[in-house]
Amino acid sequence: MANAPATALPPVRVERELSPRAVLTGTLLGILLTPSNVYAGLKIGWSFNMSIIALLVGFALWQGLAGRSKGRPTWTLHESNINQTVASAAASIVSGGLVAPIPAYTLLTGHQLDPLPMMAWVFSVSFLGIWIAWYLRPALLNDHDLKFPEGMATLETLQQIYQHGQEAMTRIKVLCSAALLSGLVKWIDVFAWTIPRWAPTPALERLTFTLDPSLMLIGFGGIIGLRVGLTLLFGAALAWGGLAPWLVEHALVVLAPDASGPQFAALVEWLLWPGVSLMVCATLTSLAIRLLQTRRRPPGGQAADRAPRARLRFSALPAACLLLSIALVVTLQVLLFGIDWWMALLSIPLAVCLAVVAARVVGATGIAPIGAIGKLSQLGFGLVAPGQVAINLMSANTAGGAAGQSTDLMNDFKVGLAIGATPHRQLIAQCIGILVGSVVGVLVYLLLIPDPQALLVTEQWPAPAVATWKAVAQTLTQGLGALSPEVRWAIVIGSAVGVLLGALDSLLPPRAARWLPSTAALGLAFILPASIAMMMGLGAVLTWLVSCRWPSVAERFAITAAAGLIAGESITGVGASFWEMLRSL
């Protein structure tokens, strides 16, 4: 995507913006799209920005109705923006901890939150991030060095569909076709006939080298790109094809003699340590370097020096809402997790500081460093309160969740600034979105994972983000002395490789850095089954081949088709889980 739209729309007068139909459309789309991110987060540890899907579907729906009823008012540009703000805020609720620290807390303590307290917690963390973004908005949007590439991609799509409406309808047909195909394959696999997971040999099957018939994974491969896809393939070969057999051969991992099928759970307990170490050290190194780079200014004080200095104005209502969000987060930490109030209060300034860091990195690079932010907050609380699992996970969850929601809203503010939207109406839409997402996301999570101890970090639900948070918390609470010498050496080697690759990725020129392996994908390949890494890598290679042969087709439809494959399988998978639950009653 380009960092800036190719052509600008003429100035648009705000006629309808926060209309009931815009909010309702965004709410309905949020209800439909949130399960996709929860499902994908538990499967592969990644989620998908739903802004562009919401824009396309909302436009197609209301323009289609307008065509059938000539007296019906058109779907305005600003209503589209509110629609995508509500829907994307709901779908981004996974950053509030649903697919990472909350399940990790359950795995380590055995304590599962009830639905209402879990909804309240996820909402409160996200609510705090929204008000932090409100006060960051004047300063960051006035900094001309911060382009917010993800927001610009949404803006470009918004402009395209209003300049070329027929193109939007064509993309919707591709999106729906891909979703139907993916959903049908998943339905056949679950209800009609279990599609075989083919493996070349029983030995490779034990090492998780099977072909998973998942079109969702193909779709994610189409989005992540060739570099990340090839890194996943290389990482799977290194971890599961090289290191895993060595572990079994030297009895560092003992498998049952009569064990058949993939032995993911036994092997990942060892492999996650070098993978997590590599990811954490690479992301923290890259984050530190990128933050230093964003602080630099062009010679002569260009760009930001010409921008007017923005002043924070603490008007009554926003200030009251910020204080309410702080009180809510602190109170819930005390009541739900037994954290001392002063320690809970300490999480607030850390959340603000890390939200600023995340927003600046996203504004400069388009990369949301939420994983790094979470690990950085875990390290901070590990030093302040060593040995305390609840503080290490849930106080750190406050910082990571607030940063995630803050960056999502900053991208929306960037879009709103370009089209003349009203900021406080966007903020209201974001609040509605996180309320919807908190309810739907928690219900879907509890539906998919009724027993976290038995289901998570398995081949069915690898949950790499959960494994990462759990591993970091274990290390910080129990210390490296609780691990075997071999695991400690693996951590040291993984950390050294992570620091090296993270530094090179940030310091080398882009043309040289693109030949480096993706550190996030390389570490993730140690935690995902090889079958998942292979299918995502296959999707990346197929998309690249299509782009080489038919570049214009790939540019127009690759991301749209991939999004359809993801949405179709994930929604069908959630529906299948719901159906199985009803049958068991």
Image (cartoon, helix red, strand yellow):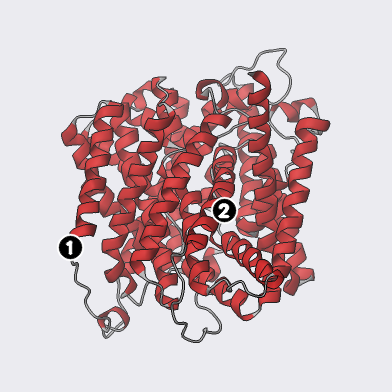
Residue at figure coordinates x 42%, y 24% from the top left: 112
501 and 383: which is toward the camera:
383
Residue corresponding to mark 1: 314
Give the amino acid at mark 1: Phe
Q: Secondary structure at mark 1?
A: loop
Point out the image quarter for the C terminus: top right
Residue at figure coordinates x 37%, y 58% from the top left: 428
Q: Callout 1: few (<14), some (14-19), or many (20+) C-alpha neighbours within 10 Å? A: few
Q: Tell whether 291 sits left or right of 156.
A: left
> Does residue 483 appear anywhere in the picture?
no
Residue corresponding to mark 2: 29
For the residues labelled 1 and 2, say whether their Cβ atoms are less than 8 Å apart: no
Q: Earlier in the sequence, mark 1 or mark 2?
A: 2
Point out the image quarter for the N terminus: bottom right
Residue 14's disc is none
Residue at figure coordinates x 42%, y 19% from the top left: 110
Q: Is residue 232 above or below residue 473?
A: below
Give the amino acid at mark 2: Leu
Q: Is residue 189 above or below residue 521?
A: above
Q: Secondary structure at mark 2?
A: helix
Work out which residue is located at the far right of the displayed protein and give it: 193
> Does residue 452 appear anywhere in the picture?
yes
